[in-house]
Image: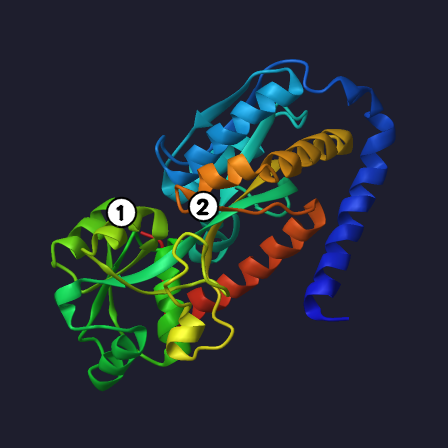
Amino acid sequence: MNRFSASAGIALAAVLGWAAVTVPALAQKSDYPNRPVRLVVPFPPGASIDFMARVLNERFSARMGQTFLADNRPGAGGNIGVEFAARQTPDGHTLLIGAAGAMAINLSLQEKLPFDPVRDFAPISMVGNIPIIIATHPKSGIQTLADLVSIAREKPGSLAFGSAGTGTAMHLTGELLMLSAGIRMNHVPYKGSAPAAQDLIGGQIPVTITDLTAMVGQLKAGTVRGLATGGARRTQAAPGIPTVSEAAGLKGFDAVGWFALFAPRGTPAPVIQRVHTETVAILGDPAVATRALEQAVEVQSSTPAQLAAFVSAEIAKWAKVVRASGAKAQ
């Protein structure tokens, strides 16, 4: 049995064991939802994760006969919204759309979190991922990722890369790139993807590692050059841009921004199953996939057990990067 299968098996056993305990006692929850449902979004309105939350809410409301509303609670790299969701009554009327930072990275990046992403939440389904792109200014002289790696090896620390902030998935993708390629660049943290992208467009910084959503328009206009995307396969949103593995020969490199649906731990198993079933149906609608791709979001559903195994693997992966890079939360 391979490592993923073993992890999935353990996670499935945990999910089924939890379900066996909760189903008999809470079978009466079959009328769910019986009042409006709050979907906590730990980012401000306008973010890609907020966009997908509103797409889901629109479809949930139509399919389940109750109002689903986005509750934006941004701050602290997603921690504020996630902590709030963890403390709510586990009856299915509060859900969370959580992202990679708070649900996988921050556990290693910060000394103490007010929640545990594994212990305090029941996984429901993956929702989607946003490709992370390594981009340069056309006048930087860097034509390919191989060029970037070569320059950084010859002159360690001579290149700077911007990201959406210290400890974000974009920053740690840069750290993973440096560890994988054996290079050193200087990290310049910004307060979000937009200002990092703007400084790249203006030529104030030679390299930016950010979410593809922030760069789609500029890539089409030719004001920035996409060197590579961080995922294991090419993205549908920009299929002409190679992966890091393809562009620099760094086999196994895989870094994406992702988000998924969770509920407070203790939420009845029938409720989890209902939300999961509806989520899979919504994400399987080609119209939803098309709308998402316009925002550079690739929809992706999963079983609760698959999501549990994925989160555990992400926590372990980023813990190694944080330890090796010495990254600290600001």
* Residue bearing mark 1: 217
In front of the other: 89 or 279: 279
Task: Judge whether 150 appears above or below 45 on screen.
Answer: below
Q: Is residue 28 visible?
A: yes
Residue 21, image x and y in percent?
84, 37
Classify 10 Å Cα crowding around label 2: few (below 14), some (14-19), many (20 and above): many
In front of the other: 52 or 107: 52
Q: Is residue 328 visible?
A: no
Residue 33, image x and y in percent?
68, 19
Q: Residue furthest bottom?
A: 154
Residue 20, image x and y in percent?
85, 39
Q: Which numbered mark, 2 or 1, is in the foreground of this view?
A: 1
| Amino acid marked by disc 2 | Val
Task: Judge whether 160 appears above or below 72 on screen.
Answer: below
| Amino acid marked by disc 1 | Gly
Q: CA distance from mark 2 to mark 1?
A: 14 Å
Residue positioned 45% across, 37% down in the render? 291
Looking at the image, tell me whether mark 2 or mark 1 is earlier in sequence order: 1
Q: Secondary structure at mark 1?
A: helix
In front of the other: 22 or 161: 161
Residue 297: give its label.
2
